[in-house]
Amino acid sequence: MDSAPHSEAAAAGQSCPRCGGPLTARTVKSAFWSATGVVVVEDIPAHVCDACVEQFYDDRVSDALRRLAEQGFPADQASRQMVVPVFSLSGRIVDAPPLPEDVFLE
Ligand SMILES: [Zn+2]
């Protein structure tokens, strides 16, 4: 139990557990898949790595997110609704020989 992603304890002033970069306190939003579709949670207090952009949550924040997930993200508690564009990769995958990783398409 207690294996939620990014639940490693991180406090302001500490360095990133992943890469050692500096952490900055920010309020972030994140998307989750619920049983019925994608939901967005905003106003999440997080520590964000300035180097690798990884986000870390305090235990109390992780607990709040876990409770919301365990409740199935009840629609009647949503603070607002968003329309989300959905894209398909069908027809977008180009059949071309692989390029070296340091080459960018223009
Ligand atoms: Zn990092």
Image (cartoon, grey):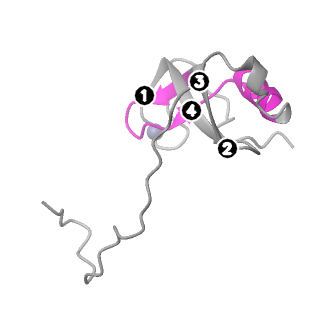
Write down the residue under mark 1: 22
In the image: residue 74, left or right of residue 25:
right
Identify the residue at the far bottom of this view: 97
- Please state which of residues 71 and 12 is positioned toward the viewer in this rendering: 71
Above or below, comparing residue 34 to residue 26 in the picture: below
Which of pointers 2 and 1 lies earlier in the amino acid sequence?
1
User: Which secondary structure lies at badge 2?
Assistant: loop
Identify the residue at the far left of this view: 106
Which of pointers 4 and 3 lies earlier in the amino acid sequence?
4
Mark 4: which amino acid?
A: Ser
Kindly indicate whether the residue at mark 1 contacts the one at mark 2 (C-beta within 8 angstroms). Answer: no
- Please state which of residues 11 and 103 is positioned toward the viewer in this rendering: 103
Kindly indicate whether the residue at mark 3 contacts the one at mark 2 (C-beta within 8 angstroms). Answer: no
Which of pointers 3 and 1 lies earlier in the amino acid sequence?
1
In this orientation, does residue 14 appear?
no
Measure how far apart labels 2 and 1 are at the Cα level.
34 Å
User: Which secondary structure lies at badge 4?
Assistant: strand
Across and down, in percent, residue 77 comes to 75, 18
